[in-house]
Amino acid sequence: SWCVGHLVGLCDASEYDEKYKKWRYEDLPIVPECWKHKILEGTKKQFGILKKLMRDSEVNEVICATDAGREGELIFRLVYEQAGCKKPMKRLWISSMEEQAIKDGFASLKDGSCYDSLYQSALCRAKADWLVGINASRLFSVLYNQNLKVGRVQTPTLAMIVDRNQKIKEFTKEKYYMAHIKFDDMDAVTEHFQKKEDADKVAADCLERMCEVEKDDVKEKTVRPPKLYDLTTLQREANRMFGYTAQQTLDAVQEMYEQKLVTYPRTDSQYLTDEMEESTETLIQMLLGKMPYVEGLEYQPDVSKVLNSKKVSDHHAIIPTMEVAKADIGELKERNRKILYLISARVLTATADPYIYESHKCQITCNYHTFYLTAKKTKQEGFKAIENKWKQFFGVKIEKEEPELDIWAGKHYGPCDSFVSEHFTQPPKQYTEDTLLSAMERAGNEELTGDTEKKGLGTPATRAAIIEKLIQSGFVKREKKNLVPTDDGNVLITVLPDEIKSPKMTAEWEMALNHIAQNTETADEFLNGITELMQELVARYQGISEEKKGQFQGKAKGEVIGKCPRCGADVREGKVNFYCSDRNCAFTLWKNDKFLASQGKKMDKAAAKKFLAKGKIHYKDLVSKKTGRQYEATVEMVDPGEGNVQFNLIFPQR
């Protein structure tokens, strides 16, 4: 049988004690002495099936065959524990769904206890997210009287997006000019001029003049083939080439993994193990006969470039499987097909020859003025030949590179044309999913020493979900390919302390989780550190000055139209409702209220103000559903609890 994602999760704070239903500063920090788990509402039926099977008298052993990674281990173990299963447990650890890989995996099952450290790491991740999410969200929500959702990984990620956006806002662009001389394909430029007249003078001096290549700094450069894909580099490439979100790419490659067309997707390795040499050579020959973009391609693959067992931890790089040979690729969904072509192309480029070229940095003189030109001359196309073929196949624009020119030091060229170009200094670019994934992967590394492997925000398996969560929470929005913070996102980062939004700290936590999986650090040490941080934050933020609170409230959305009849806080206008600004109070007046609509009335701003001031409004032109006749009556607002609002009709006495 199977799990459908998480079947068991951690209980909410209110399930430990009724008093936690109300968010209060006095109750913080909330740190469970004994952690409780519960069966998740949407998956109770499947949990019941698994529990029955685990307790069946005919079952004497359980094999964990969930995804071979941290979260996969957690999903199974929580079900095993919640079901009260005590039967022996084995672990199937595979990176491919091919039949042979599955057979090999079953032939080398390990005792489940071999993965206890991985389970502890996963459990720590869940508990750390709970401790930070519950306590920091409640602390800052209560202090600022706003619903502020804080996450261990998503908040530092949001902080990076907000910081980049702020730098763009603060950037002041400056105009500058360059003079050019042009002869055939040669286009040389001066350094920057602040004044246009200076550039115009140089251009005028050089018009129809001869120029000389005074210096030519020639260097032979070698570009190594790209590595195979791990999940993050695949997501980045798919975003850059096709505009796919990280989640869309993960969904596509996961689906193809389940169809046995590619290997395990949630990997952070870009290499294959040494023993895969022969199977990889066979795979490449199959791809050369199957992929439509390799027609006429001649190259000798060097598989040794992608083999390194020392750089493969849990899973090797993402590659296609031999099942592709039998598959009708044309029948795949367009997105899946493009991703499969991308993964296949990377296997070919990664095993191809390097790209070798001559780099020319030239200094050119024309009528006593100095110009500069960068050019190149290709000596070996190598992997670029394959890269350009599949880009042409997909219609992907090939990046503009330095011109291919024959330039010779001491030679004269001309007579030259000349002109002036106008430019502006450029601000930093907004994050795209490509650049954000890269930034998340590197986050905090520049401030840390020692081994930088596996640091960063989140893991390859979780980064896509973090981005989606920020968007769904209303902190980030997509503007074409760009990821831009919303007003709520900017405000949240403004009020949070550095500890919560620091990529460095979260990167250290992610590294600690990795150490727990490797059994070089204990779970208790890690969780004690996070508990102490929460205690320190609660002690430090005992109150917020009215000035700070007012600054935050000033950014709240919606005009204040009255006072809440339940708690006395401001009621503001939203897009679809009039809502109480106190997050602990659920009072709401809906603009599309069905009762008022049935009477031909709207809950507009004027009506909402009257209801809040008097609790009722007298209408003269209500219409009877039965007779169609008009009548007059008072509509009274009633609060039955939990913030829901109902309306009663009060007819005048006859």
Image (cartoon, rainbow, N blue to C red):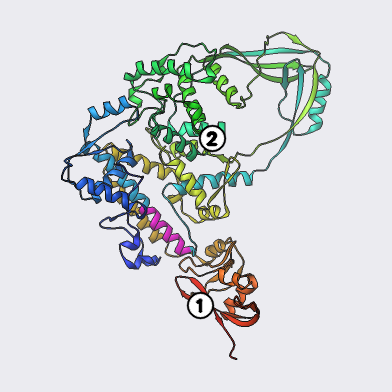
Q: Is residue 329 visible?
A: yes
Instruction: Give the x, y percent position of residue 336.
Output: 49, 32
Q: Residue at x 22, y 33 (%)?
A: 110
Q: Could you tell whether 28 is left or right of 217 in the image?
A: left
Residue type indicated by callout 2: Asn
Q: Is residue 117 above or below residue 603?
A: above
Kindly report which numbered mark, 1 or 2, lies closer to the viewer in this rendering: 1
Asked if marks 1 and 2 touch (Cβ < 8 Å), the reply is no
Residue type indicated by callout 1: Val
Segment colored magenta:
130-143
Q: Residue at x 55, y 47 (%)?
A: 162
Instruction: Give the x, y percent position of residue 583.
Output: 48, 65
Q: Could you tell whether 323 is left or right of 601 in the image?
A: left
Q: Is residue 582 above or below residue 281?
A: below
Q: Earlier in the sequence, mark 1 or mark 2?
A: 2
Task: State the residue position of label 2.
Answer: 239
Q: Local crowd at mark 2 within 10 Å, few (<14), some, or many (≥20)? A: many
Find numbered disc 2 in the image and state the secondary structure of the residue it sits on: helix
Quadrant location of the N terminus in the rendered image = top left
Q: Residue at x 53, y 20 (%)?
A: 292
Nearer to the camera, 558 or 99: 99
Task: State the residue position of label 1.
Answer: 638
Instruction: Give the x, y percent position of residue 554.
Output: 59, 63
